[in-house]
């Protein structure tokens, strides 16, 4: 399952968790976890900690910058 707004997670996305904490996605596992169809994201929170969450617990704040020609993150 993607973020709560329907976007598929990618590394580098800025997100807000349902708790209100914001951070940056550093790892994505599509269709992972205990419930099939749920994506998991590992997030480095702005306060310094990190955690793994089901993506639909997060809202996309801003999309990671990518290079269209190469399909890579900038």
Image: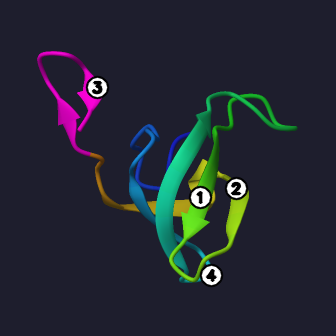
* Residue with the mark numbered 2: 53
Name the N-terminal-most of marks 1 and 4. Answer: 4
**How far is disc 2 from disc 1 in space, using C-alphas?**
8 Å
Q: Which residues are magenta?
A: 65-74
Q: Residue at x 57, y 83 (%)?
A: 47
* Residue with the mark numbered 4: 19
* Residue with the mark numbered 3: 72
**How far is disc 1 from disc 3 in space, using C-alphas?**
19 Å
**How far is disc 2 from disc 3 in space, using C-alphas?**
24 Å
Which quadrant does the N terminus fall into? top right
Identify the residue at the far right of this view: 34
**How far is disc 2 from disc 4 in space, using C-alphas?**
12 Å
Q: Nearer the observer, disc 1 or disc 4? A: 1
* Residue with the mark numbered 1: 43
Badge count:
4
Specify how the rendered protein is coloured.
rainbow
Mark 4, Cα crowd under 10 Å, few <14 / some 14-19 / many 20+, is: few
**How far is disc 3 from disc 4 in space, using C-alphas?**
30 Å
- Mark 2 and mark 1 residues within 8 Å of each other at the beta carbon: yes
Q: Residue at x 22, y 35 (%)?
A: 66
Q: Residue at x 58, y 41 (%)?
A: 27
Which quadrant does the C terminus fall into? top left
- Mark 1 and mark 3 residues within 8 Å of each other at the beta carbon: no
């Amino acid at each position: 399952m993607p973020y709560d707004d329907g976007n598929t997670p990618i590394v580098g996305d800025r997100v807000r968790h349902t708790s209100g904490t914001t951070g940056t996605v550093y790892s994505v596992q599509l269709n992972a976890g205990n419930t099939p169809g749920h994506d998991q994201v590992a997030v480095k929170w702005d306060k310094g900690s990190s955690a793994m969450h089901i993506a639909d617990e997060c809202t996309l704040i801003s999309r990671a910058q990518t290079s269209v020609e190469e399909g890579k993150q900038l």
